[in-house]
Amino acid sequence: MLELRDICYSVKENGEALDILDHVSLIIPDGQLVVFTGPNGGGKTTLAKIIMGLAQPTSGSIVWDGRDVTNMSITERANAGISYGFQQPPRFKGITVRKLLTLASGEKTLSKDRCCQFLTRVGLCANDYLTREVDSSLSGGEVKRIEIATILARNSKLMIFDEPEAGIDLWSFARLTETFEQIHKEGRASMIIISHQERIISLADEVVVIGEGRIRHRGVVSEVLPNILADTTGSCPVIGKEASGK
Amino acid sequence: MSEKDIDRELLQTIAGMDDKPEGAAFNIRKNGGCEGRFSSENIAITGKTDKAGIDINVKPGTKNETCFIPVIITESGVSEMVYNDFFIGEDCDVNIVAGCGIFNCGGDDSRHDGVHTFHVGKNSHIKYTEKHYGAGDGKGGRVMNPQTVVYLDENASITMETVQIRGIDSTVRDTRIYCEKGAEAVITERLLTHGEQHADSNMIIELNGEDSKGRVISRSVAQDDSVQVFKPCVIGNAKCFGHVQCDSIIMGNANIHSVPEIAANCADAQLIHEAAIGKIAGDQILKLQTLGLTEEQAEDCILKGFMS
């Protein structure tokens, strides 16, 4: 189980504190698929980074699997079973897809068959990709899918995906949603997916709408979806009018 | 470490040799002398009589054979100038493994200067691997200055891999390649410097024949207070294709000058160059940390990958 207790995160801007996250508390039971959604700049990615240790909260604590991980390093959290798929994954000159998957698996070697399993689940063929370097010769969509494959290879108990659909073509996207569905069905891992895609949101046990650094709504898909649109239009009368079709 | 162990470590590191290769042509040079030599049916190695060095003659049509010619220096204060000439017949496909290892635990500089000249016959391909490595805790310098001159006849090609693994205090590398019609040169350079080391690498590839190709891929890591200067140049004198790519990772207080040059003397020459110098990106380290590596392991992994 993951428990976020009263998480605050603020940065200094022009000498003044700017709140990015404002007293966020949340519990995610084991095996659940939770989607973080909401307007851009609302704090979703920051919250996800705080869980992985990529950002340190100003106050509050994170309890994972019964252990307070708030002061643990990224590496320690990774080894405690938390994984994170970056929204914009870095590229590595000289590091092949196979090497990256092997590193992710934590094993010394990874068979072609195992690599193939992970790559197939993100719609890539091992024959075409295993020996390729994860460098600028790959498209943004390819790098993104390889990033997701590394999370599958980690096989950790908590998987966080930051906008996994970004830059991915429609056909691969369909394959990807099947993969998330399959992991969810197997029940071995909890998943946090930051997404704006209705297809992914519809897979969620719980949808958490984050805006202006707070949890605006949370609940099952059918309850929360209608609220998302209202939040997105905000107070702009023109957008609101167009959105409502009047 | 015993002398035998030192020899073994050097030979393993620079040439991947655990022992004298069975059946393959080889020449092992140690501290200025010949430690062992063998000529195969198709590859003849003979010592020069007028100066230090060897001639390597490869019979036309020789395929899938490897020739090892490593050099090791284990005594402090050795300084040598060696000339090795390669005569590769037509229609060959051979692998040449060179390399130099210096173990210096004394106070005097140990230095190896070598000139390798290749005459590669029509339609022949050679793969040439040259690794440099320095070890030992002596204050004396480990110095290597390799010159490589390659003449590629029509449709001949060379794939050249040069690696400076670590431990070389000073090096000036000089590479010149001349390509006739349809010839192709692919040079992959990997260079690591650390401490107060200095490395210069100068290359000139002349694309003289129609449809000749030249490609330089240089990757380097400069750590601590080391200095690197790269000057690769591709000259297009005919309808040809040339590409120079230099990538460097800079660390600590190091200093890197990367000066790729292309020059065209023919309107049909198509030449490209690119160069980049930068430190290890923070998001690369973070990504590998999320895979369970420590910061140090992540950095090591990125550098090894970059230099592989």
Image (spheres, coloured by chain):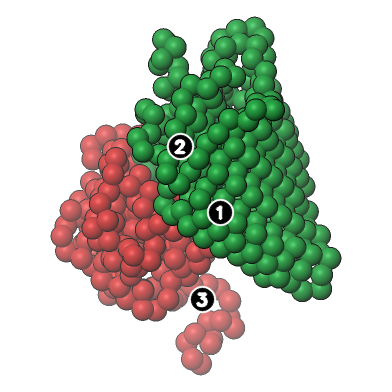
Picture coordinates of residue B37 (x, y %)? Answer: 47, 29
Residue at 35% across, 44% down: A103
> Label 3: how many residues lie within 10 Å, few (<14), some (14-19) or many (20+)?
some
* First along the sequence among labels 2 and 1: 2
Q: In the rendered image, which quarter contains the N terminus of chain B? A: top left
Q: Are marks 3 and 2 in contact (CB under 8 Å)?
A: no
Q: Are marks 3 and 1 in contact (CB under 8 Å)?
A: no
* Mark number displayed over residue A222: none
Q: How much space separates mark 3 and mark 1, taking CA atoms?
A: 76 Å
Q: Which residue is mark 1?
A: B89
Residue at 34% across, 65% down: A127
Residue type, mark 1 in image: Gly
In the current view of this chain or complex, which residue is farthest to the bottom?
A246
Q: Helix or strand or loop: what does disc 3 sit on?
A: helix
Q: Nearer the viewer, residue A236 or B4?
A: B4
**Vertical placement of residue A42 versus A199, above or below:** above
Q: How much space separates mark 3 and mark 2, taking CA atoms?
A: 81 Å
Q: Which residue is mark 2?
A: B39
Q: Which residue is mark 3?
A: A233
Colour red maps to chain: A
Q: Nearer the viewer, residue A16 or A49?
A: A49
In this image, B302 relative to B236: left or right? left
Residue type, mark 2 in image: Ser
Residue B138 visible within the image:
no
**Vertical placement of residue A197 versus B217, above or below:** below
Question: Label 3 marks which chain's residue?
Answer: A
Question: Label 1 marks which chain's residue?
Answer: B
Residue B84 visible within the image:
yes
Residue at 62% across, 25% down: B168
Residue at 64% across, 14% down: B78
In this image, A11 relative to B238: left or right? left
| The color chain B is rendered in | green
